[in-house]
Image (cartoon, helix red, strand yellow):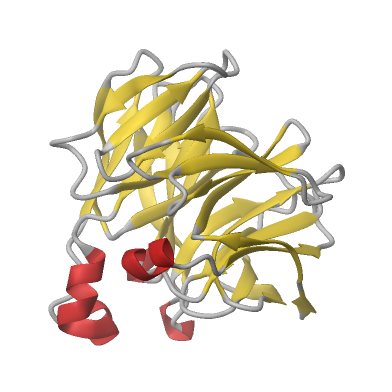
Amino acid sequence: MTSTTVLHSGLHFGEGPRWHEGRLWYSDFGDHAVHAITVDGVDERIVEVPGQPSGLGWLPDGSMVVSSMTDQRVLRFDGTNLTEHADLTGLAGWWVNDLVVAADGTIFVGDFGFDLDAFLAEHGIEGVLGEPGPTSTVLSRIAPDGTRSVAATDMVFPNGSVITPDGMTLIVAETLALRLTAFDLYSDGTLDNRRVWADLSGLLVAPDGICLDAEGAVWVANATAPQCLRVAEGGEILDTVDTTQTAFACMLGGDDGRTLFIMTAPDSNNEARTAAREGRIEVATVAVPHAGRP
């Protein structure tokens, strides 16, 4: 078991951490912007996203894509201009969320499926884990030419996603189903052979953001506790990193890929997090480096 140090504080709510070109890039919901920060804590506000940014990735041409949550779009930033890459209205069940970009530029995007804050206010966490239960939604796919389609149905709050180094497996965190779900990923972007990669319901672990390491284990930010868990296929917990607040996303990076960056906050209530600046980026050194995408 390992504890963290705080790299940066004063965020509203950090999400979508990605190690890219020597810095950690991340979204801050309440600041409505994408930032990048060095390992020394030098932070730069890169681009404003009025619709609230979340998942991040890079296309083969080097341009960045970012999910714009509240208007259900994926935007493209070329370093100067922010433009629409795909509109997911009518496809996504509610606000769009995290995403992952395959090597050819295919993007897989999750969404809430329903108004989570309103649901929790009415039913509490018991309503998520019991009756009436969360509403399912789709995992959206955006082809390299921007064409949108449904990649998978009956997903329960599809969130953080990773693609294995060989490009042949997609693993998705179904946060409110308390599981990691895997698919075979084909070269045309289609998914098949859906299966439970890790059932975390016995531990009441709600996997939010995730990242993959070189031994094939998945680091899981547990949205129900101040911790990140290293999970093997099948659900065995291999390691735990304790954080100062609830963990909502994680990414392996640094020069050797062994720095685990964790986005933490007191909770995920959108109104409360927008009003306060209590979010943090916490870091720990782990044994096995990053692999795969993102």
Q: Quadrant of the C terminus?
A: top right
Q: Can see residue 68?
A: yes
Instruction: Tell me residue 274's x, y (percent).
Output: 40, 61
- What residue is rendered at 39% in x and 71% in y? 178
Viewer-nearest residue: 9 or 199: 9
Q: Would you place residue 286 above or below residue 187 in this image?
A: below
Which quadrant of the structure image shows residue 23? Answer: top right
Q: Can see residue 130?
A: no
Q: Is residue 32 left or right of residue 227?
A: left
Q: Is residue 218 left or right of residue 135?
A: right
Which quadrant of the structure image shows residue 175? Answer: bottom left
Instruction: Tell me residue 145's x, y (percent).
Output: 36, 13
Count of picture labels: 0
- What residue is rendered at 36% in x and 37% in y? 191
Instruction: Tell me residue 236's x, y (percent).
Output: 61, 74
- What residue is rendered at 42% in x and 30% in y? 107
Which quadrant of the structure image shows residue 60? Answer: top right
Viewer-nearest residue: 95 or 201: 95
Q: Quadrant of the N terminus?
A: bottom right
Q: Would you place residue 104 above or below residue 73 in this image?
A: above
Q: Is residue 104 left or right of residue 21?
A: left
Instruction: Tell me residue 282's x, y (percent).
Output: 70, 65
Viewer-nearest residue: 30 or 206: 30
- What residue is rendered at 51% in x and 19% in y? 104
